[in-house]
Image (cartoon, rainbow, N blue to C red):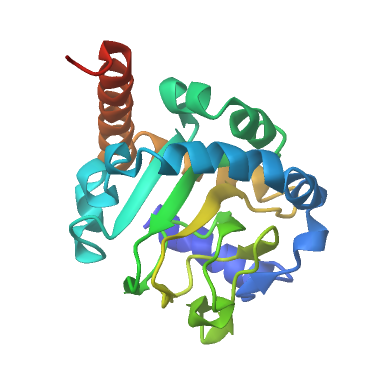
Amino acid sequence: MLRAAMEWLITHATAQGRRAFFEATDFPWAGALEAHFTAIRRELDTVLQDLPQVPNLQDLSPDQQVLTEGEQWKSLIFHAYGRDIADNCARCPQTAKLLQCIPGMKSAMFSILAPYKRLPPHRGPYKGVLRYHLALLIPPPAQASGICVAGETRHWAEGRSLVFDDSHEHEAWNGSAAHRVVLFVDFMRPLPLWLVPFNHAMVWRLSTTPLVSVMVGRGRAAARQWLAGQDAGPRT
């Protein structure tokens, strides 16, 4: 009930409440991330060398079973609504450092879609955050993969940003024969000052739900297991 009321206010009482996509240039930090694309991509490439160890999203968050199955959507989570997964941040230290420069950053991950995977129409949990994608690995042809938000379709380009309101119904697809990867970030939506404290309260409330606590707990366990396997090394 409270979430619905806040979403109504954001939609009807703010100038950009109905927008699907936003200009990345309105967020100066997006340009900084683009400038460090090579460093982030280098850490991603290291992660992809051990891709089977990256958790499937539905294994971290059972609520995602309606969107994916098997190994079609993998996620290396760094943050989830303000809670860190420290081992994953340590695995990608430059990426983790850059994420801290995003004002109001709440969640962040490497989002990895398998070849020919299509996510069905769905919506995000709350309109008070916006979603950011930095395209890290977009196999050719680039037009084969994309995202449609509230009827508007965009395509990723490596090293470039997309910002959108994921509370609109949206779907995404990888129409190529290789994995598609973006740096996926949720951050606090810019709002009029009178709405800001209410929005922070709603986001805090979401951070205490099982949706988040289960994901963080499973993400930390998966990260520890991966690290333990590396420390053990190959057996002879």
Q: Position of residue 206 (x, y in %)?
A: 40, 42
Viewer-proximal residue among 39 and 201: 39
- Residue sitting at the far front: 236
Where on the picture, by quarter, is residue 138? bottom right
| Residue visible at 43% across and 62% down in the picture | 4
Q: Position of residue 189 (x, y in %)?
A: 64, 53
| Residue visible at 27% across and 29% down in the picture | 222
Q: Position of residue 92 (x, y in %)?
A: 54, 30
Viewer-proximal residue among 74 and 194: 74
Q: Taking the image as drawn, is residue 153 in sight?
A: yes
Q: How many marks?
A: 0
Q: Position of residue 156 (x, y in %)?
A: 60, 70
Specify whether 54 is left or right of 163. left
- Residue sitting at the far bottom: 151
Where the N terminus falls, by quadrant?
bottom left
Task: Tell me if residue 153 comes above or below residue 28 in the rendering.
Answer: below
| Residue visible at 19% across and 49% down in the picture | 62
Where on the picture, by quarter, is residue 160? bottom right
Where the C terminus falls, by quadrant?
top left
| Residue visible at 41% across and 37% down in the picture | 207
Q: Taking the image as drawn, is residue 107 in sight?
A: no
Specify whether 24 is left or right of 167. right
Task: Tell me if residue 121 comes above or below residue 105 in the rendering.
Answer: below
